[in-house]
């Protein structure tokens, strides 16, 4: 039986390879190459990869240990959902998932309408060149369908830290984001080839770039949420190389979506939009594969293999060189003379673009500097998280200001003082609230106060702008997506700052019967018990949380002992309240009679996730409004 | 000057100022926040590094672990050639044990002791931090492949 699956799946991969080759030849405008049906071939590409992916899922579900991949990454006693998510908890499987999404985007674009045939052919051809490259890489260098000769009775198992429902959906969501930018990249190259990077091009790109961006945001947020409760450090962002690797394409993409908007409305900034498209996709590749290559040393690196890193670096290098040479050759032809007022919405967006690129540079330097010293000087070092927070904070203040003011400016030259007078009530309100906050909470750090002030301005102005009545008191259509996302960003920044300032931590060594205190709460250590689950044993402690003698909640932090493979994890117990999270995690050091308990109060965590959710929904709304107000002046 | 040229010039100068300020801030901040990693032998050679925040890695020496109270611990970190005594106050990770790899973050004091404020934890029992492997390789004590 295994042998059949082996032949079928490898045949399917070769089939996709052939179809992609035919599809990519359409880049040459010649009847011989363009004749085979674009949509028919896209179907073949999709179905072949989809079937092989389904086969891989099936092999994991039935635990067919004749396949190397299943043997190394699964175990018969694992719960069903983790057999399923184990499919992409490893290098080969996640590559196949990556390719599946690549093919899916290709297919969806091939079906889209109202796009000139030639432009569509070129885009699909470029997309197919990438499909060809990655399927070839999968087939020859990291084939998921490899049989072994031994009859293994059971598998080695999935890293327990990955056995988590959130981590089952985190990679697919993140990948949809990353891979979505492959299509944006293909569209950019197609635009360069046809020399048509204009308003029409921007309207074609807009839904794709916004949905990819929304998915990437969601993917990063899921990863961050997972780290928050699974890694047991009470933090949600560690400026870890792998996290940075996913943040970098996000920053570039954020700049890109704004450029696409300006291009659509004003037909300016063609070159810059193309550069950002190429940059975003290259960073997405770095994000996916540097993580898997083992070059980055991090808590998130699980499936690593340095040998394959070389292929990816080579691939990224090829993409950069070929696309930028094409760009250098054709960029003069796509640029139109720009006409924008000096103090206008366009300028504001441009300034924010610069600020985003600065943040990108900061993150890039901080992430790459240790790599460079390690490779060149053979010296190990780490860049402390303070580097990022202190360097990025002032830029965030400027960004928040321009996010607030730019939507208020017109596209033509506007008088700044008139706008400020117009917004005087808003500014006074925010100023008052900031003053109250800073006095009440004794907050006197200038950076923090400024971030809170500008965040408030942004939140209030975005929210009032999204509910807009005209002179007849009728609700007029507003740019809901933009306002929601901007308000969400303001909320996120406020939550980040307040969380950093007001987090509290207490460490206790506790025996059963002890009463521990954290602010106004008392935690009674009730009991500790051993629990046996199907794939792990656990030590579970019970803490009763009381306030003024009244029982509020029970906390059950755990330590889990997995045997396949042998690993110990600490599971935090978290109470989510609207204004703050209470977070308990325990450790059992060797040779000790008591357990160590770490208790955190993490203010504004719920609000922080809420802000992020608003950004994601804003992105989805902007993606689904297909044709913006093209003729608005 | 036409208004177009003027507006472009202003934009260009503005961006130039922003970029140079940004680059300066970045470089200064990066320099201030670098945390170097040393093995015990390396650290003894660089005794001028006292008082800086750094990371120290190696194996926890056999029979060196003592606890003063429930949350103050003493142990030594070795690379097989040299040892450095470490004092740590806080929570030890689940997998902390003698003769296992460890990385601590803290300050190297004038009296040659290392005051750690963080013990970096990993979840896998067989995991060895790459820096520790490198340290053991340098001192010739690495026995893995």
Image (cartoon, rainbow, N blue to C red):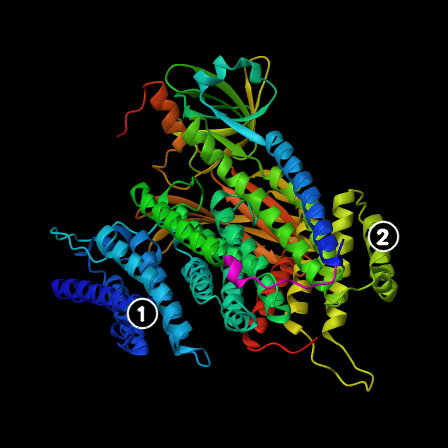
Q: In which quadrant is the C terminus of chain A drawn?
A: bottom right
Nearest to the observer: residue A99 or residue A64:
A99
Give the left or right position of residue A34, taking residue B86 as reference.
Answer: left
Marks 2 and 1 on same chain: yes
Residue A179 in sight: yes
Label located before the other in sequence (2 or 1): 1
Q: Residue A573 in the image: state x and y as whole percent.
A: 54, 53
Q: Which residue is mark 2?
A: A435
Q: Quadrant of residue A299?
A: top left
Give the left or right position of residue A450, taking residue B93 as reference.
Answer: right
Instruction: Look at the numbered discs 2 and 1 and tell me whether their residues touch, using CB distance below 8 Å.
Output: no
Q: In which quadrant is the N terminus of chain A drawn?
A: bottom left
Give the left or right position of residue A108, taking residue A504 as reference.
Answer: left
Residue A234 in sight: no
Tell me the chain of label 2.
A
**Residue at 51 percent of width and 54 percent of height:** A249
Residue A341 is one of the magenta-drawn residues: yes
**Residue at 41 percent of width and 42 percent of height:** B123
Q: Residues within 10 Å of mark 1 (few under 14, many from 20)?
A: many
Task: Give me the C-alpha separation between circle 2 and circle 1.
Answer: 63 Å
**Residue at 32 percent of width and 53 percent of height:** A90
Q: Which residue is mark 1?
A: A26
Q: Quadrant of residue B17?
A: top right
Tell me the chain of label 1.
A
Q: Residue A389 in the image: state x and y as whole percent.
A: 64, 42
Q: Tell me where the magenta segment starts and ends, as one range.
A: A331-342
Q: Residue A43 in the image: state x and y as whole percent.
A: 30, 76
Q: Residue A271 in the image: state x and y as whole percent.
A: 55, 58
């Amino acid at each position: 039986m295994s042998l059949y699956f082996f032949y079928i799946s490898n045949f399917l991969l070769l089939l996709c390879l052939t179809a992609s080759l035919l599809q990519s030849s359409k880049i040459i405008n010649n009847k011989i190459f363009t004749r085979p049906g674009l949509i028919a071939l896209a179907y073949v590409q999709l179905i072949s990869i989809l079937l092989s992916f389904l086969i891989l899922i099936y092999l994991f579900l039935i635990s067919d240990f004749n396949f190397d991949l299943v043997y190394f990454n699964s175990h018969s006693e694992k719960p069903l959902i983790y057999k399923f998510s184990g499919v992409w908890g490893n290098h080969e499987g996640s590559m196949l998932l990556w390719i599946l999404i690549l093919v899916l985007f290709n297919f969806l674009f091939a079906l889209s309408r109202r796009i000139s045939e030639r432009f569509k052919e070129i885009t699909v051809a470029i997309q197919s060149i990438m499909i060809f490259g990655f399927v070839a890489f999968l087939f020859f260098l990291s084939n998921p369908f490899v049989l072994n000769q031994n009859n293994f009775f059971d598998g080695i198992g999935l890293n327990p830290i990955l056995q988590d429902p959130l981590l089952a959906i985190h990679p697919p969501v993140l990948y949809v984001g990353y891979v979505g930018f492959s299509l944006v990249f293909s569209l950019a190259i197609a635009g360069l080839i046809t020399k048509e990077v204009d308003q029409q091009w921007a309207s074609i790109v807009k839904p794709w770039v916004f949905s990819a961006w929304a998915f990437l945001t969601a993917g990063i947020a899921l990863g961050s949420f997972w780290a928050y409760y699974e890694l047991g450090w009470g933090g949600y962002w560690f400026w870890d190389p792998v996290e940075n690797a996913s943040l970098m394409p996000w920053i570039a993409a954020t700049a890109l979506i704004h450029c696409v908007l300006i291009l659509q409305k004003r037909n300016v900034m063609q070159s810059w939009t193309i550069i950002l498209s190429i940059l975003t996709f290259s960073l997405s590749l770095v994000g996916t594969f540097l993580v898997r290559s083992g070059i980055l040393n991090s808590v998130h690196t699980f499936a690593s293999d340095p040998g394959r890193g070389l292929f990816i670096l080579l691939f990224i290098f090829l993409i950069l060189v070929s696309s930028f040479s094409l760009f250098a050759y054709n960029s003069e032809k796509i640029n139109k003379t720009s006409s924008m007022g000096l103090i206008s919405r366009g300028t504001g967006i441009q300034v924010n673009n610069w600020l985003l690129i600065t943040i990108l540079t900061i993150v890039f330097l901080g992430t790459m500097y240790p790599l460079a010293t390690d490779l060149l000087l053979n010296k190990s070092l780490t860049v402390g998280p303070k580097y990022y927070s202190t360097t990025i904070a002032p830029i965030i203040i400027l960004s928040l200001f321009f996010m607030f003011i730019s939507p208020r400016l017109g596209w033509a030259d506007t008088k700044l003082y008139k706008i400020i007078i117009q917004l005087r009530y808003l500014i006074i309100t925010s100023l008052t609230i900031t003053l109250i906050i800073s006095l009440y909470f004794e907050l006197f750090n200038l950076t923090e106060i400024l971030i809170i002030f500008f965040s408030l301005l942004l939140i209030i102005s975005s929210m009032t702008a999204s509910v807009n009545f005209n002179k007849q008191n009728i609700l007029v259509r507003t740019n809901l997506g933009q306002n929601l996302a901007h308000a969400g960003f303001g909320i996120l920044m406020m939550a980040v700052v307040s969380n950093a300032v007001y987090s509290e931590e207490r460490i206790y060594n506790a025996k059963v019967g002890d009463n521990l205190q954290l602010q106004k709460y008392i935690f009674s250590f009730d009991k500790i018990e051993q629990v046996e689950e199907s794939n792990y044993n656990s030590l579970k402690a019970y803490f009763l949380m009381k306030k003024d003698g009244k029982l509020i909640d029970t906390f059950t932090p755990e330590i889990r002992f997995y045997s396949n493979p042998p690993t110990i994890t600490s599971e935090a117990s978290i109470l989510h309240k609207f204004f703050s999270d209470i977070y308990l995690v325990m450790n059992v050091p060797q040779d000790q009679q008591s357990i160590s308990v770490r208790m955190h109060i993490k203010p504004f965590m719920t609000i922080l996730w809420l802000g992020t959710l608003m950004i994601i929904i804003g992105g989805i709304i902007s993606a689904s409004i297909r044709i913006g107000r093209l003729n608005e002046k | 000057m036409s208004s177009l040229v003027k507006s472009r010039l202003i934009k260009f100068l503005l961006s130039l100022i922003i970029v140079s300020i940004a680059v300066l801030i970045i470089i200064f901040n990066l320099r201030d926040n670098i945390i170097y990693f040393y093995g015990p032998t390396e650290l003894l050679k660089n005794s001028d590094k006292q008082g800086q925040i750094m990371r120290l890695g190696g194996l926890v020496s056999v029979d060196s672990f003592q606890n003063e109270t429930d949350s103050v611990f003493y142990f030594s970190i070795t690379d097989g050639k040299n040892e450095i005594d470490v004092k740590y106050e806080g929570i030890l990770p689940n997998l902390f044990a003698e003769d296992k790899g460890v990385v601590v973050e803290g300050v190297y004091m004038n009296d040659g002791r290392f005051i750690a404020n963080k013990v970096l934890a990993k979840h896998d029992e067989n995991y060895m931090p790459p820096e520790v492997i490198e340290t053991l390789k340098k001192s010739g004590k690495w026995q893995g492949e």
